Structures are given as structure tokens and as C-alpha cells.
Amino acid sequence: MTVPPEPIVKTVNKKRVAIIAGALIVVIAVVWFVVRSRTNATPAYRFATVELGNVQQTVSATGTLSAVKTVQVGTQVSGQVAEIHADFNDRVTKGQLLARIDPTLQQQAVTDAQAQLVKAQAQYVQAKAEYDRNQPLFAQQFISASEFSLVDVALSDALAGQKSAQVTLDKAKQNLSYTNIFAPISGVVVERDVDVGQTVAASLSAPQLFLIAQDLKQMQILAAVDESDIAAIKDSQVVNFTVQSYAGRTFVGSVGQVRLQSKLTDNVVNYTVVVTLDNADGALLPGMTATVLFITASATNVLTVPNLALRYKPTAAQLSAAGIAPADTMRHAAAKDTTNPAAPPVGAAATARPKRMLTGGVGSAGTLYTLDPAGKLKAIHVRVGISDGQRTQVTGDSLAVGMQVIVGAALPGAAATTAPSTNPLTPTPQRGGRGGP
């Protein structure tokens, strides 16, 4: 019997050891992966802090700055512009000469009207003398009534002609005076639309030569507000606005008028709100675009949370694991918030108005979620106040400054995180700039 060489036996044993070792490595890797997967299955959340601060609820709109009173200066006569005595940005006073139209044609019209008046006066004198000569003859019945009637009519016609000629002369003189363009008000010239030598025609409508703003120290903004927000705009309401030219600077004004006339723009009904403001330093210029914020409500030193905290809803599995029935998240509306005596009692009425609780609003019920000391999900029932589009005022017995509330679930495998107080998790504001859960 032939015995194999010893080196072959050693090679076979090494292969078996390598196979066994590889199998053990695979088993260990599978066990590690399963344990890691179970560890990652534990829910992780993103948190935000309940803070004490101020909240302002606003309605946003855009508008254009303009002077409170502007006057278009035109001409009532046609002709060539002969002189210009005012330019852009010039300050003018009422009655100051701004420009002059070539008066040649108007002067000729005055001369012709004067000649026609002299002719009419001569005709009247002749008719009056004829009347004075025939009146005694008619009284003594030397001429018939029909003959004297012709003399009387001729005198009346001559008198009317004299008056007409006088009116024509006055009209020609008035047109001549219109060749001098005077400032109707005191203010600043913001537009000049003509140059020397340009011909203007006033046959159909008065062409604009200048635009004068009465006083740029008092200005206004004509802001277009959506019909869904117009009910919140009231007279004398405080308004904050910004312009692109002064980044970081906020100007203040007030609502002067809410115009009743509506305008349809892109199938959206808008109303014009007039915002009055003080421009004592002259920083604001006509035509600037302003971003306007109407302050409709405000609260100071109140508890606030990010809007995402009120929008967060755990899954049914998470609620079940925490021992929270899904119905319990709505049942808390039956209890009145003792920290807010002004909050209306709901009780049975809350179940009759489910839409209000779901859509939210000032005084409506909301739910925040946090973790108890054991790491389990815990619901906190609150009442919702006003919102600035990023943070919302909340009140509740269980709330405290610095409490961590859940704003969302963390990514798979990520640890729980806390949102900074600058609130990077800013939700998209509602239309008109008003936020809310």
C-alpha cells in the first residue's frame, strides 16, 4: 500500500481551517449586522427648544412709493416750446415760470380780434345813429312800423356783434397768457417731458410738460393686498416696510386708507391700501418698491415653538409603543387651558368643530411631542396663539422654557439632534405672510 507524501496532507488541513475561519467570519458579520439594524430601528428625533420671546403676526404685500400729491403740468395751447426755466429735481414755488410756448400765433390772434372789435364798434355806432334818427319819425308816424322794426333789429344785431367781438378778443388774450407755463403748486420737479424746440399739440388733450411733487417729506405707499388678508387691515394700523436701497433698515408707517375699489390681477382680487409715512431725511424716493408688513397682532414675553413642532405627527406604531391612543391626541381639547383664561372653553363643541382643530388658528388646540425620562414619546396638549410664519405662541400647563419638543424624525442611523434657537427649520409661510400651524 502506497502512503501519500506528508506535504499533501498538510495542504488539505490548511484548506479546511481556512474554510472554517471564513464561515465563522460570515456568521459574526451577519450577527453584527442584525444587532446594528435592531439598534438603528430605535426612533431618533430632531428637537427644538421652547423659548420665551415676542411674536408679531403680519400680512405682507408689495407697493410703490409716491408723493402724497403730484400735479401734471400741461399746456392748453399748441405751439413750439421756446423757453424752459425748470429742470429735474428743481424746487419751484407756486406761480413760478416753468416754460414758454412760442406766442407768435396767439399774438396774431389777439391783433385780429382787436381789429374785429373795432369794426363791430363802428357798426354799432352807425346802427345807433340810424335808430336815433328814425325813432322821432316813427313817433310822428312819418314811417311805418315795419320800416322802424328793421332799424331796431339792425341796432340789436350791431350790439350783439360788438359783444361777440369783445369775447373773441378776451379769448385770444387768454390763449396768449397760456403760452407762459407757471407752477400750479410749490414742490419738486420729478419729471420734465419736453425740450426747447419741441412742438406740443393740445388739440385733443393737454400734453404733460412737467410733473411736480408737492412735498417729498410726506410720502405714501400704494400696496396691493390680497382679498384673503384685507379683513385684517385697519385704519391707523402700524406698518413696517423695507426698500432694496437700504438693506437692513426698517421704515415705519401707518395705514391711511383702505380703498374699496378692487382690482383683478392674475385671477386674484386685490385691494389698494394707502400707507402714509414720514420722509423727513429724504432717504426715500418716488418709484421705489417697498416690501410692506402690516402688523395685525403682537404678543410679548410668551412661550413660542417652531411651527414644525405643531405640525409633527408620530406614526401609529410610535403612538402605540408609547401607550398613546390616536384618539387621545384630539381628546385634549375638552379641557380648558388654565394658563390662558381668555381661551374659549371647547368641550363638546370641540367635537362639533373638527375642522378648526385640524386647520389651526388663534385659540385652537394643538399637540406637541417630547420624550419622558424613560425615553418614551409623550404628548403635550397646548393652545395655539398668533404666529409670525416661523414660530407660534403656545400656552399649556406642562410647558416650560427650555423644554425640548420634537420637530421631526432624524435620518436613519442618525442620532437625535437639537435645532438651534435661530430656527433653521423654517417652514414656508402662508400666503400673505401669515404663518400658523
Image (cartoon, rainbow, N blue to C red):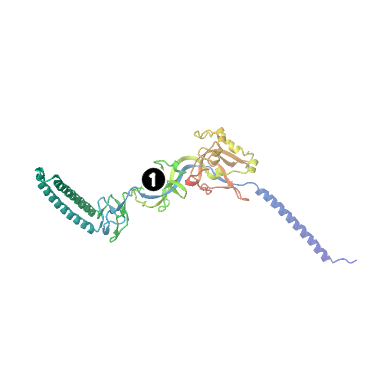
Report the quarter where the N terminus lies. Answer: bottom right
The one nearer the camera, 342 or 370, is 342
27 in relation to 348, above or below = below
- Looking at the picture, how far across and down is residue 303, in whole percent? 51, 40
Q: Amino acid at mark 1?
A: Val
Relative side of 120 to 206, left or right: left
- Looking at the picture, how far across and down is residue 4, in whole percent? 86, 66
| Residue 103 found in image quarter | bottom left
Element assignment for label 1? strand
Q: Residue furthest right?
A: 1
Relative side of 70 to 334, left or right: left
- Looking at the picture, how far across and down is residue 314, in whole percent? 61, 43
Number of marks drawn? 1
- Disc 1 designates what residue? 274
- Looking at the picture, how far across and down is residue 106, in whole percent? 23, 56
Residue 16 seen anywhere in this rendered image of the structure: yes
Residue 347 seen anywhere in this rendered image of the structure: no
Relative side of 100 to 370, left or right: left
The one nearer the camera, 200 or 147, is 147
